[in-house]
Amino acid sequence: MSDDFELEEMRRFVTQYESCEDPYLRSEFLQQTGTTFAVVRRYRQLIAAADRALAANPTARPGFRADRGRRGRRSRPTPVRPPGHARNRRRRSRVTVVVTVHIVVELS
């Protein structure tokens, strides 16, 4: 989760949805909010993932990475090519440009 507020909003929404016991009321709730059951299911998955992450590391809060910025820049080893091999063997992706011209001729 990127933000604690978003996670709490998802929790609140799922709680409201689950408070409707009648399937008809649940359908009405989804219709009023303009969402689908797939959204509710995805919110449940995200909430469960955030809860698992908190359980694994109780000192961390969601959306915060403590290790950000610690890794320095990695230096690449200097490539050594055997003699006779091409410099760059990877194919470069080429962009194909399609130009469409419409000509309208009016005969009088």
Image (cartoon, helix red, strand yellow):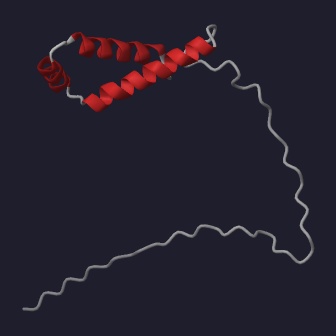
Q: Nearer the viewer, residue 93 or 17?
A: 17
Left or right, residue 11 beside residue 29: right
Q: Position of residue 59 (x, y in %)?
A: 64, 7
Left or right, residue 96 beside residue 12: right
Q: Nearer the viewer, residue 5 or 56?
A: 56
Q: Residue furthest front?
A: 22
Res 61 visible: no
Query: At 42% across and 25% down in the image, what residue appears?
Result: 45
Query: At 37% across and 24% down in the image, what residue appears?
Result: 43
Q: Residue furthest top?
A: 59
Q: Is residue 25 above or below residue 74?
A: above
Where, by quadrant of the figure, is residue 61 drawn? top right
Query: At 30% across and 16% down in the image, what residue appears?
Result: 13
Where, by quadrant of the figure, is residue 71 drawn? top right
Q: Say which quadrant the C terminus sits in.
A: bottom left
Q: Is residue 83 above or below residue 61?
A: below
Q: Nearer the viewer, residue 17 or 65?
A: 17
Res 84 visible: yes
Q: Position of residue 16 (x, y in %)?
A: 26, 12
Q: Position of residue 50 (x, y in %)?
A: 50, 19
Where, by quadrant of the figure, is residue 36 drawn? top left
Query: At 46% across and 72% down in the image, what residue appears?
Result: 97
Q: Residue furthest bottom?
A: 108
